[in-house]
Amino acid sequence: MTTASTPDPSPTAAAQAPGRGTSRQRRFGKAGRHAERHRSDRIGWLRAAVLGANDGIVSTASLVLGVAAAGAEPRTLLLTSVSGLIAGAMSMAAGEFVSVHSQADTEAADLARERAELTHDPAGEHRELAGIYVGRGLDTALAAQVASQLMAHDALGAHARDELGLSDTTAARPMQAALASAASFSVGAALPIAVVAMVSPGQLIVWVALSALAFLAGLGALSARVGGAPVWSGTWRVAFWGAVAMAVTAGAGALFGAVA
């Protein structure tokens, strides 16, 4: 009686699985697909979007509160807040692009160095990769076998992933970060501006402060939900620090307005 053979679940068998991917997947090593849903592939744009929206709400609301506390007229408040939206969106886009591009340059330099080392000392790189797997719990013989098969399949991808900690999921994407930050900042800043345009001058400070806190709480809950984190902790953290920023700015505006 014969039995059906079963696929070999060992790391060496997994390392032999063929496949083609995008240029970024070939650069960092292709990740296998499975049914589980993870959210780590959202890290890049989610971080930039949350930062932009949070900054848009907090900075614009704080600006309005500070200028209003100093006794500015409604027209001045509206012009100031719109100018803050435009300047802030451009600043967020430029800042994110430059900073994330610096990260991408560093990743590219590390990959170029690793590529050169693989060319000049493949045996040493093999020992280095095998040592990493030994440190993760494999015995020496199996670690050497896994390193050999992974390097035969995609040497640079194996070293990028296991030695440098780089992958397609966490790779720097400057343009994506810049666009996400600018767009989310504009949306966030537009919310307090809409409140400024709709409420009466006598109630402006109260309405801007309360609505900004509500917007921040909603942003915290939404970002936590999308990122898979506890909703309550994300909500109170974003709302609390936004409240601190607005209180400090309003206090400073009232102080300087009284002095002036």
Image: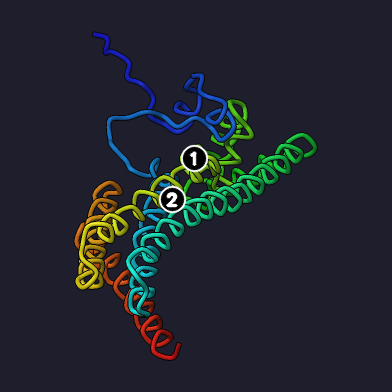
Which amino acid does the dot numbered 2 rest on?
Ala
Q: Quadrant of the N terminus?
A: top left
* 257 lies left or right of 102: left
User: Residue extending furthest bottom?
Assistant: 259
- Tell which of 49 and 115 is nearer to you: 49
* Horizontal side, residue 69 vs residue 29: left or right: left
Q: In which quadrant will I find the C terminus?
A: bottom left
Q: CA distance from mark 1 to mark 2?
A: 9 Å
**Badge 1 is on which residue?**
176
Q: Look at 38% across and 57% down and name the residue there.
A: 56
Choose top left, top right, bottom left or bottom right for residue 77: bottom left
Residue lying at 33% horizontally and 43% vertically, measured from the top left: 39
Q: Secondary structure at mark 1?
A: helix
Residue at mark 2? 48
Mark 2, secondary structure of its residue: helix
Q: Amino acid at mark 1?
A: Gln
Residue 252's spot in the image, x, y percent? 40, 83
Tell me the crowding category of disc 2: few under 14, some 14 to 19, or many 20 or more residues within 10 angstroms, Cα based: many
Can residue 164 be seen here? The reply is: no
**Seen from this angle, which residue lies furthest top?**
1
Q: Nearer the viewer, residue 15 or 78?
A: 78
